[in-house]
Amino acid sequence: MGSFKYKGEDNMTDLLVWNAEYCIGEDTIDAEHQNLFHLANAVFKVKLSESKIDNIGPLIHKLYEYMKYHFDHEEEFMDAIGFTEADFHKTKHSEIIAEMNAMLKSSHQISVLADKLAAMMVKWVLKHILEEDIKIKPYLR
Ligand SMILES: [Fe+2]
């Protein structure tokens, strides 16, 4: 994936702030998690600046596609290292994608969608990393 820089994003507050404690210890997975933070922040910041609201559709699409890409990769990784809770973890990923699909379907106004999305990213990304992805960590030793 290339850079996720969007014009004007640097002078506003971040929705999600990365912390080294969020690392599970696998470089590619950790980098993908940081990309998700960056994408969520980009959606949030475009939402905050009314003039850039036209950019938000493609950005939300990119975030959605990247979530799926990352979950698929993470699931392959869990299987490869023999993570015993992989099945449970996969259902968590499916729930997030289902919630995301429902949100995309039900929100007809793009600004409303962006608001809801920003709120849910905390649960779908940050909370998920801290409660679920972190369980992978002991398997890396
Ligand atoms: Fe996960």
Image (cartoon, helix red, strand yellow):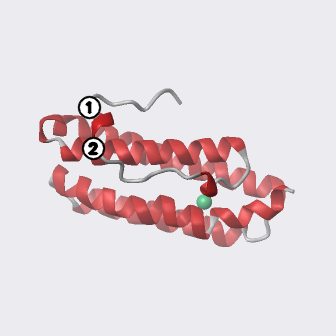
Figure quarter occupied by ligand 1:
bottom right
The amino acid on which the numbered mark 2 sits, given as a three-letter code, is: Lys
Residue 131 pos. (x, y %):
59, 70
Residue 101 sits above or below residue 7 on the image: below
What label does residue 129 carry, if any? none
Q: Residue at x 56, y 48 (%)?
A: 33
For this rendering, which residue is in front, 40 or 94? 40
Q: Residue furthest right?
A: 141
Asked whether 107 or 131 is in front, the reply is 131
Quick one: label 1, few (<14), some, or many (20+) residues within 10 Å?
few
**Residue type highlighted by circle 1:** Gly
Query: Residue at image x 33%, y 39%?
Result: 59
Q: Residue at x 22, y 46 (%)?
A: 47
Please tell me the numbered disc located at residue 8: 1
Quarter placement of the C terminus: bottom right
Q: Earlier in the sequence, mark 2 or mark 1?
A: 1
Image location (x, y in percent) of residue 34: 53, 45
126 on left or right of 63? right
Please report contact status of discs 2 and 1: CB closer than 8 Å, yes or no.
Answer: yes
**Rendered view: 132 above or below 4:** below
- Between the C-alphas of marks 2 and 1, the distance is 8 Å
Q: Measuring 60% from the left and 41% from the top, which residue is drawn there?
A: 31
Crowd tier of the residue under label 2, counting other residues whose Cα lies within 10 Å: few below 14, some 14–19, many 20 or above: many
Say which element carries label 1.
Answer: loop
Q: How many marks?
A: 2
Say whether residue 69 is visible: no
Q: Which residue is mark 2?
A: 45
User: Left or right: 14 with respect to 95?
Assistant: left
Residue 7: name its quadrant.
top left
Is residue 54 visible in the rendered structure shown here?
Answer: yes
SS under mark 2: helix
Within 8 Å of ligand 1, the CB of disc 1?
no
